[in-house]
Structure formats: structure tokens, C-alpha cells
Amino acid sequence: MKKKFLGPKTDLMLTRMLWAVGGLLMGMVIISAVSQKRESIIGDISVNVEMLPDSSRLITEKDVITTLTRSIGRNIQGMPVGTLDLERVEERILEKDPFIADADVYMDARNVLNVDIRQREPLLRIIDANGKTYYIDKEGKHMPTSVNFTARVPVANGYIPPFTPEYLRKKRHTLKSLYYFAKKIREDEFMNALTEQIFVTQKREFIIVPKLGKQKIFFGRYENMDDKFKRLKIFYEEGIPYEGWQKYKTINLKFDGQVVCKK
């Protein structure tokens, strides 16, 4: 009887079969591991709230856990991993919170639920003409005040109309001008350090009350801000050191190319 030898085609078929069996076994192992992971229990919850530039937190770790517990309807610790929809937790629960700009939620290998929070950053605290108090954030959106902390940002009051979500789309709106004025102040290191309060007059003009001194700085309407800032800086650098902080009651920048002061 002649001995039969395996040819190249048979070797190739065996190799493919071995790869197929190996892949099937690997798939079964992965499915089993995923299933076990989904059925395993959530252990601890680790919440990290990124501080604002002034080192404050408008929302605390406890607030985040309370929000999750109330929204889900039960304590997350002890829940099976597979019953928690992480995408829903991020987008429909946490990122709907008025103090949260972004949330990143993930489960680590030890079944610890990690929640990383980036806060919305207040730009200005508003006290409108009706006495309503709230923040406007860097994007121009409405934010409630916090029971935990008061953000160290300028306070704006006076003849400010009630907040409406579409105010930035208006051609002319007092709150819109105020928002861009506050942004301009925030972007300027000198003005940001100087400004304590912004008062809005009936004529929609701005008056700044500085952190130092008792004088009022009249800016007028939101126009030619770069030039007005420049004139004010020169005055503080060259005039105030010789006359003193308490010398003037008002500093007026409304007139082109001038700084008009009253004692």
C-alpha cells in the first residue's frame, strides 16, 4: 500500500481550521468575560470636580452623587455594572446640570465608577432691574447662583432687563452689550484685576466701580473699548501715582482721546 502524504492544500485547510477554532474559543472567552463584568457589582464611586480658575467649586462631589442617586432612583453602589447606561449618565443626567459643562463617566477594572466633572465658568454675576440674581457664563448662558460658593467675578446691576435665552441673537440688547463688555474685561489682565462692579445706566452706559479707591469710571456705551482701556491704563500708570487713589471721585472716558476727572 502506498503511503499518502498531506499536500499544501491540506496543510492550508488544517491551518484555517485551527485559526477558526482558536478564534471561536477566544470569542467565547471574551463573551464570558464581558458577561461576568456586566453581572459584577459596582463598588465605589470616585468623583473629581475640576476647580475653576479662582480655585472655587460651584458644585461638590456630594452634589454629583446626590444628582445621580435621585435621577437613577437608587444607590449606584451595589448595582450590576451592566444595568448602568454610562452614556445616559453623562449626557442626560450630569450634563443637564446647570453647573456642569462636561462630564466623563467610566468604569475601571476594580468596578469603581469614575466621574470627572468640568464646571461651567461664570463670567459675571447679574442683579437685574427686577432684583433677580444669576450668573452668565463664558458662553453667555444663564447659570443659577450656587448654595456652596460665590464665584469671584464682577457684579453687574442697574437697568438690566430680565434674561431671555435669545438675547445674544438680538441686534441691540443691553444684556448682550454687557456680556461682551464683561468678556473684554476678563481678557484684559489690568481691567480684570481692577473691576469690582459694573453699573448699567438708563442710557445703557457702563460705570465701573474699581476694587481700589472710591472713584467711579464712566465708560459710556460699548464702543471703542480698546481705546478706552488704553487711556485708563495710562492714567493709572502716570496720573494716579502722583495724585493718589482718593484724589478723584469720577474718571470719565466717554470723550474721544480724553480722560476727564472730577475731584
Image (cartoon, rainbow, N blue to C red):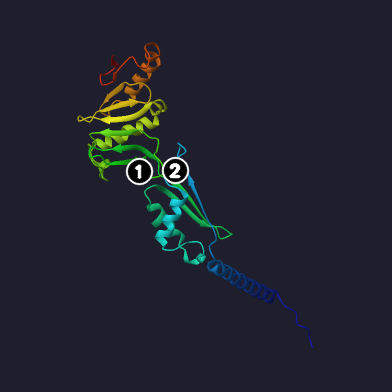
Q: Amino acid at mark 2?
A: Arg
Q: Amino acid at mark 1?
A: Thr
Determine which residue is flagged by label 2: 57
Q: Can you give x and y, in whole percent of width and height, for residue 154 in the image?
A: 35, 33
Q: Secondary structure at mark 1?
A: loop
In the rendered image, residue 211, in percent from the top left (x then y), is placed at 37, 26
Vertical relation: 230 (above or below) 123: above
Q: Disc 2 on helix, strand or loop? A: loop
Q: Extreme top residue here?
A: 242
- Residue 57 position in % (x across, y down): 44, 43
- Placement of the C terminus among the 4 image quadrants: top left
Q: Determine the residue located farthest toward the front in the rendered image.
A: 147
Q: Which residue is mark 1?
A: 145
Residue at 31% x, 16% y is 248
Give the residue furthest to the bottom.
Answer: 1
> Residue 249 sits in which quadrant?
top left
Measure the alpha-carbon separation of dots 1 and 2: 12 Å
Mark 2 crowdedness (10 Å alpha carbons): few <14, some 14-19, many ≥20? many
